[in-house]
Image: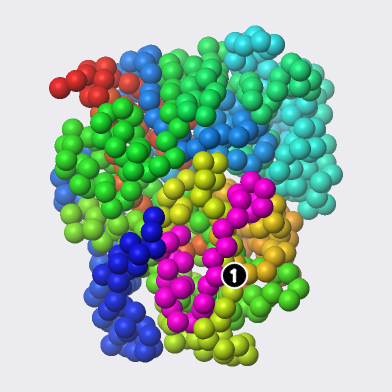
Amino acid sequence: MERSYWNRVLDSRLSRRRAIAATGATAGAAAFLAACGGGDEDSPSSSGPAGPKDTSGLLANITDETKNAKKGGTYIGSHPGVILTHDPMKPGINIRGARRGFSQLLRVSDGFMEGANGTIEGDLAQSYELSPDKLTLTLKLDPGAGFAPVAPVNGRIVDAEDVIFSWNRLQNEGIGASELSNAKSPAAPITSVTAPDSKTIVIKLNQPNSTILSLIGSQVLGTWYVLAKEAADPAKIEIPRKPIGTGPYYLVEDSEVKYSWLKNPNFKRAKLTNGEPFVERIEEPVIPEQATGVAQFRAGAIYEYGVPANEIVVTKKDLPQLNMRQTDPNITGTERIFFGQIEGSPFRDERLRIAVMRTLDRDGFIAAAHNTDRFASEGLPVQSYWEAALPRGVYEGWWLDPKDEKAFGPNAKNYMFDLAEAKKLVEAAGLKTPMEFDMVYAAPGPSSFPAGFYTRAEIYLGMIENSGVFKMNRKLINYQTEWTPQYRNAKGQFSGVTWGPDTSSQDPAAAAYFMHNSAGGYFQGGDATLDDLTNKARAEFDDNKRKDIINELQRYHGSKFFNNKIGVAGGFALNWPAIRNIAVHRGGTNWLCITTSSGLKAWLDPEQPPLKKT
């Protein structure tokens, strides 16, 4: 996406807001901003206590159609890039394949007609029990959970040896090992994993940890996915190219142009009593270009696609037979900005970090990135959220709104767009404006981030560039060989600024530790207070007390800004009506069939377009 395009978008939407903010936010200016949608609770972009109502007539009615499900059929979607490795313990863009093809011991349960609330259920584990002293977790494997029907496993039932092999491999090769294995990191909880028999797993912990269940059930790449023990011999199973697991599907076509999965007939879970998943086959042609994806979707060649927010309404109006639905904020589909903390980096000074974040008009970013003002003008219900230390997509009731000064405290001011204040902060740090720095991030490519990340990046990077407070030198580097080791995994030991996708957990205490504890997997700088708060949160099993700790952390980080989010909105999505029963079961981990999370209960209706031509 060209910078000039987003400059025009921002100019048209934000010129009045910037004119005010550049001279300081007086009381009159604040009122004017509110009238333009800048924080008024009655504005169309505000969620409000009950949320805005739909007056558009464009949205489909979402109902549970599980009892009417038709089994079989081929779902045709798309994949955003070429998968360099199918190894679920390594980084890449194989999260869909990991969620379809592999299993974990536990999973976060789906919400019904709403997002997940943090309830944990078994995946490979049929049952589990945490000892009274919270130091031993015992799990019993589901007796019906089997591998895909391919050699050399040939559909056999999973056993404890597979789990132990996978645990040992995670410790040796998994990028997320330090989150779980005490042998890899003294702060990690698991000291040992043993198997007293073929169906029992015993996990010993170094100390009570309230996040242990969600950590084991995290679907993030690099965590504890269960592989076949035969993979110990690469001549038998070459994991990067031959993913064989116990998930609902298994890979049958692997090329740079298309990926195809078939239903795993040995995927059995005690909870699933209707023969889920209902869809028999999944095909995903590789479509890295957004314009091509939209064109293919419009033609009915693919059944759902992430149509850009500014094209959704016109696409629905052009093709009224499409179903349009409301979507929840995405926890992993948005980005973080983080600052170099290596010795000599100017961004070790928190005033400069805050200054960068104050050049961002968060409401303007959300409007441009998520099309909220245009959706509201169509009568569609829009919910938008400023984000801070935690994403909005964590368990319901745990995210703290930076716009709510009463709840957030005095550091709420640091989230307000104010170029004059940003300039003062830079000068207070002893530097002249515009201050020059390097913005280094992964270059677009077939194995890099999906296109939507770069579309949004042009908005907030354009805000920083056009602020007059900073002069930003963009440097684009290779995702796999440079950005991942030198920035994503560098624990803040770099100079300059970068951005990358958020890969945090839905569990707010686990997410806080992951991002803001010095032993966390996405740590990019912090201090003793953040270490203390995140450690306390993990040790606290009372939900209300743990929530108080997480709220304190969010308020405190509002004065530090080591690892920052910007904002997000609930949005809208389109699909062809042949896909039924989606957006009913939402927010759970793994168990993915179609692109939209559906708890394996999506099904295909051959009497609906594009399967049935009209």
Q: Where, by quadrant of the figure, is residue 438 drawn?
A: bottom right
As drawn, 415 above or below 282: below
Q: Pick whichever, 51 or 37, lies toward us.
A: 37
Question: Which percent across, then down, holds residue 153?
Answer: 68, 12
As drawn, 485 above or below 518: above
Q: As drawn, is 536 to the left or to the right of 11?
A: right
Q: How crowded is the residue under tag 1: few (<14 C-alpha within 10 Å), some, or many (20+)?
A: some
Q: What colour scheme was applied to this rendering of the protein?
A: rainbow
Q: Pick whichever, 10 or 119, lies toward us.
A: 10
Q: Residue at x 62, y 78 (%)?
A: 350
Q: Pick whichever, 90 or 521, lies toward us.
A: 90
- Per the image, label 1 sits on a secondary structure element best described as strand
Question: Which percent across, then down, holds residue 352?
Answer: 59, 79
Q: As drawn, is 124 to the left or to the right of 372?
A: right
Question: Which percent across, then down, holds residue 292?
Answer: 35, 39
Q: Is residue 467 magenta?
A: yes
Q: Residue at x 55, y 41 (%)?
A: 447
State the residue position of label 1: 438
Q: Residue at x 18, y 33 (%)?
A: 321
Task: Magenta stretch: give its range.
Answer: 457-484
- Res. 366 visible in picture: no
- Res. 463 visible in picture: yes
Q: Where, by quadrant of the figure, is residue 159 drawn?
A: top right
Q: Pick whichever, 446 or 416, lies toward us.
A: 446
Q: Residue at x 67, y 48 (%)?
A: 481
The total of numbered circles placed on residues is 1
Question: Which percent across, then down, holds residue 418?
Answer: 42, 81
Q: Quadrant of the N terminus?
A: bottom left
Kind of residue sitting beneath label 1:
Asp
Q: As drawn, is 35 to the left or to the right of 213?
A: left
Q: Where, by quadrant of the figure, is residue 593 drawn?
A: top left
Q: Is residue 371 magenta?
A: no
